[in-house]
């Protein structure tokens, strides 16, 4: 049998079909980013007088000049409701000046009066320009200050509640409270301090003077040292540790001494003695 006879005639060889192309995928559409438009120049604003003022206060306006940074010159400004510009040299012949009046210490400026707002913004008596008569009320900034104040107060109160009494005692001594009182009374006194002066209260825990003062007071109570009007002495040997100038508090002087390089050894000695009592 020939080669031709071996291979069937009329039947084409099988060929592999070309792989179908995957449909092209479109890139995912980007989500539009949220842009918060600034509306600083298109909003209502309010100004307030600083300090005590009468029911009605008129803002000085006659012959008022300010520095025009854009033109590098001194120019006169005045508020004329019918003029778009506050610069007197750009106002028409029929421009009529109008009084700017604060009532009960406040002046509300609607967004429909941009010329009045501009006049108040560059007025030399505005605190933003170095003045001391009035300022813009920044509600956002005020809200941030109040929020920070509330958080600080909450942190201070939490410290009174959560910290062990051993950590609170040095702070109580620093603020002049009786640490021989019941624990509840000590915490109550500290709570009042935390509410009145939250920042000072919180910072007291990281103040080395607080711990040093506590050590000095306890060392005196346990008769390791004697605090007299003229100096601080070792109780057992009556040896002078540091002299106290006339009219100064022995506790304050001894505390400051313990925080010096020379007094650091004394402080360590007192801390060691007190630790053995625990």
Image (tube, helix red, strand yellow):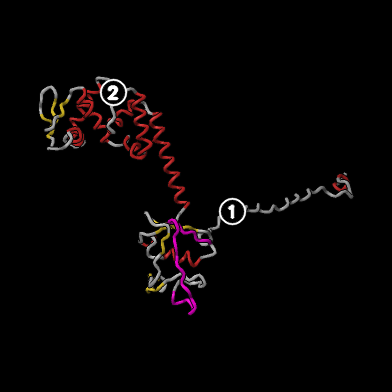
Residue, x 36% and y 35% (percent of image)?
Answer: 194
Q: Spot the residue most to the top.
A: 277
Choose mark 2 or mark 1, whichever is in front: 2
Q: Spot the residue most to the bottom.
A: 93
173 or 234, which lies in front? 173
Task: Specify whether 100 is left or right of 5.
Answer: left
Residue, x 43% and y 36% (percent of image)?
Answer: 154
6 or 155, which lies in front? 155
Q: Residues within 10 Å of mark 2 (few under 14, many from 20)?
A: few
Residue that numbered label 2 is attached to: 180
Task: State the CA–CA distance, disc 2 to disc 1.
Answer: 62 Å
Is residue 181 depicted above or below 210 in this figure? above
- The location of residue 246, given as percent across then percent down, is 12, 37
Q: Does 98 lie within the magenta span?
A: yes
- The location of residue 96, given as percent across then percent down, is 48, 74
Residue, x 86% and y 44% (percent of image)?
Answer: 6
Which contiguous range is marked in magenta?
Answer: 88-110
Q: Does 197 lie within the magenta span?
A: no
119 or 71, which lies in front? 119
């Amino acid at each position: 049998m020939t080669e031709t006879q071996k291979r069937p005639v009329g039947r084409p060889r099988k060929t592999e079909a070309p792989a179908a192309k995957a449909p092209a995928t479109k890139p995912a559409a980007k989500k539009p980013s949220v842009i918060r438009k600034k509306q600083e120049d298109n909003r209502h604003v309010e100004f307030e007088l600083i300090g005590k003022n009468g029911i009605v206060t008129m803002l000085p306006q006659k012959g008022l000049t300010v520095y025009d940074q854009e033109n590098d010159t001194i120019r006169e400004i005045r508020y004329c409701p019918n003029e778009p510009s506050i610069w007197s040299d750009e106002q028409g012949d029929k421009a009529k000046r109008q009084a700017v009046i604060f009532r009960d210490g406040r002046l509300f400026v609607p967004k429909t009066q941009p010329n009045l707002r501009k006049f108040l913004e560059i007025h030399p008596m505005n605190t933003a320009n170095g003045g001391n008569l009035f300022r813009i009320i920044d509600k956002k900034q005020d809200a941030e200050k109040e929020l920070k104040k509330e958080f600080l107060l909450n942190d201070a109160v939490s410290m009174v509640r959560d910290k062990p009494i051993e950590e609170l005692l040095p702070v109580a001594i620093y603020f002049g409270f009786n640490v021989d009182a019941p624990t509840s009374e000590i915490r109550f006194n500290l709570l009042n301090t935390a509410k009145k002066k939250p920042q000072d209260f919180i910072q007291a825990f990281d103040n080395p003077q607080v711990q040093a003062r506590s050590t000095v007071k306890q060392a005196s109570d346990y008769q390791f040292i004697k605090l007299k009007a003229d100096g601080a002495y070792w109780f057992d040997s009556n040896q002078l540790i540091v002299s106290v100038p006339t009219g100064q508090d022995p506790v304050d002087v001894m505390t400051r001494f313990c925080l010096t390089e020379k007094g650091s050894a004394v402080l360590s000695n007192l801390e060691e003695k007190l630790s053995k009592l625990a």
